[in-house]
Image (spheres, rainbow, N blue to C red):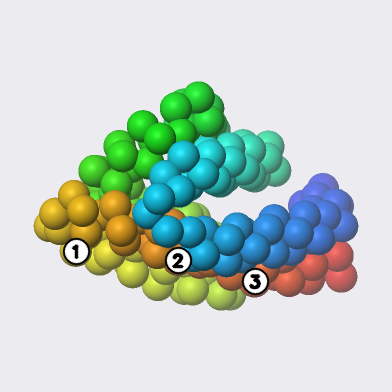
Amino acid sequence: MTTTTEVQMGREAGRFWWLWLVIGVLWVLISLVILQFDTGSAATVGIVIGIMLLVAGVQYIAVGTMVDGWQWLWYVFGAILLIAGLASLFYPTRTFVAIADVLGFIFAFIGLIWLIEAFMMREGNELWWLTLIAGILMVILGFWLGGQFFIAKAQTLLVFAGIWAMMRGIIDIITAFQVKKLQDI
């Protein structure tokens, strides 16, 4: 049984469904831009990664303001992403090199975040399993990439950053339509 307050909160969140849609489309566009880069544009990739991390950090903090349970976790992940994004903007070439060097760990960490997110959304989102699958794939990619040489990591950074952004965008677009359903409660 839902209370009047829960219904009102659901309707309020449902009114902003388009934010998830816009952010999802932006992630997809960013992924397409990243997938066009070559390894000579390391500074540009570092800047794009910094912007991606900042957007993700703001997004996680915004979600933290809207949820009741596990709110602190959303804030922690958001703060980590914001700090990493700022560092990336100040040192874009170093960011590219550093991220290429630890790319396997980063993808495994992002996959872990998505796995936690999937289980947190399980009760309120019937498509939570899509986030679960994306998280599992990211963890697998992380372990695979961790075993590669640096040159291969640098070259695949472009592809995997694009894939990461594409998956985040698809998840956000799907979430937008799930949140939109809350308007009709």
Q: Secondary structure at mark 1?
A: helix
Identify residue for label 3.
174
Number of marks drawn: 3
Identify residue for label 2.
163
Q: Earlier in the sequence, mark 2 or mark 1?
A: 1
Could you tell me how far apart the alpha carbons at marks 1 and 3 are, in whole angstroms? 27 Å
Q: Nearer the viewer, mark 2 or mark 3?
A: 2
Q: Secondary structure at mark 3?
A: helix
Horizontally, residue 42 falls left or right of residue 78, namely left
Q: Label 3 crowding class (10 Å Cα cut-off): few <14, some 14-19, many 20+?
A: some
State whether residue 69 is above or below residue 39. above
Identify residue for label 1.
144
Residue 65: % across, % down: 68, 37
Identified by mark 1, the residue type is Trp
Q: Nearer the viewer, residue 92 or 128?
A: 92
Residue 156 visible in the current orientation: yes
Residue 76 visible in the current orientation: no
Identified by mark 3, the residue type is Ile
Q: Nearer the viewer, mark 1 or mark 3?
A: 1
Residue 9: % across, % down: 80, 50
Horizontally, residue 94 falls left or right of residue 102, namely right
State whether residue 93 is above or below residue 153. above
Q: Secondary structure at mark 2?
A: helix
Q: Earlier in the sequence, mark 2 or mark 3?
A: 2
Q: Label 2 crowding class (10 Å Cα cut-off): few <14, some 14-19, many 20+?
A: some
Residue 148: % across, % down: 15, 58
